Image: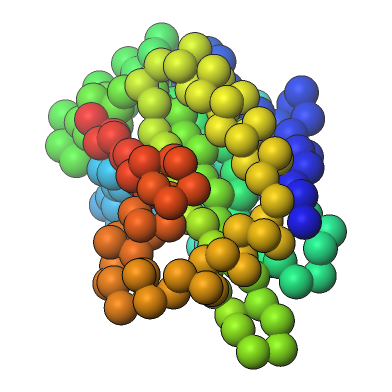
Amino acid sequence: MQLYSKTSPTATLIEHAELSQGLTKQPPRDFLYGRGRYFDADGFQLNPLEQEYYTANNIEINECLGVMAAQYDWLKTNDSNFIIDHSFVVTRCCYAGHAKQQLKDWAVDNPWLRKMLLLKPKWGLDFALEYYDNYNYVEVLHIERDYSSYQEAQEQKEIIESRLIALDWSEVAQNLLRHQDKWLYLEGMARNDWKASYLGFGKAEHTLKAF
């Protein structure tokens, strides 16, 4: 089994990860204090207020695994014995211009908005592949990569994508099953790290804080 890329020119990493267009009016305080208060300090999840800004700046956001973000399909497979749990490229934007000034003004009475002002742009890759047959069901590989530079993210995307596409995943799955005594009893990230290292990807995750 081999993978193929579904990334289109409009569904990729966002190079200029800044939101400068402000909202037409300030949301009500109960929105800012309630649904707008949650802030993902580690990943790419956008709270409702952030989603409003992305929409105002004409950046498409999508849902995956219950998370709303500027994330777009990456790799696909048409092999019935493999399931891609998720596979996407994703961007988290910072705030500039009118949007930034707006948040500064609103943060006077809503100090939690300061976190949005501290955001640093980051770009990510996320890929999780599973295999099953009549007797087995196994997560084959799950890797996540965050980058603070668009250029590095784009370069690494091309490198990782080429490696993922080149692998014979049917052979990989069978090899993992033959060696499951080495990883089956590992817990949490230790298991993911073992599989990622076995396939030459090093650590399974490299993530960055949002600010």
User: Which residue is pictured at 36% across the width and 21% down the height?
Assistant: 148
- Asked if 76 appears above or below 59 in the picture, the reply is below
User: Where residue 120 sits: x, y (%)?
Assistant: 31, 23
Tell me where residue 7 sits by quadrant.
top right
Q: Is residue 109 visible?
A: no
Query: Which one is in front, 60 or 204?
Result: 204
Query: Which one is in front, 44 or 52?
Result: 44
Quarter of the figure that contains the N terminus: bottom right
Left-right relation of 72 to 8:
left
User: Where residue 108 sits: x, y (%)?
Assistant: 16, 29
User: Where residue 207 sits: x, y (%)?
Assistant: 32, 39
- Asked if 98 appears above or below 192 in the picture, the reply is above
Q: Is residue 80 visible?
A: yes
User: Which residue is pictured at 44% across the width and 74% down the height?
Assistant: 180
Query: Which one is in front, 32 or 123?
Result: 123
- Asked if 171 appears above or below 145 in the picture, the reply is below
User: Where residue 211 sits: x, y (%)?
Assistant: 23, 30
Tell me where residue 60 sits by quadrant.
top right
Left-right relation of 78 to 59:
right
- Asked if 149 appears above or below 55 in the picture, the reply is above
Tell me where residue 118 sits by quadrant.
top left
Left-right relation of 80 to 45:
right
Query: Which one is in front, 191 or 152?
Result: 191
User: Which residue is pictured at 29% across the width and 44% down the height?
Assistant: 42
User: Which residue is pictured at 48% across the width and 55% down the height?
Assistant: 142
Left-right relation of 32 to 9:
left
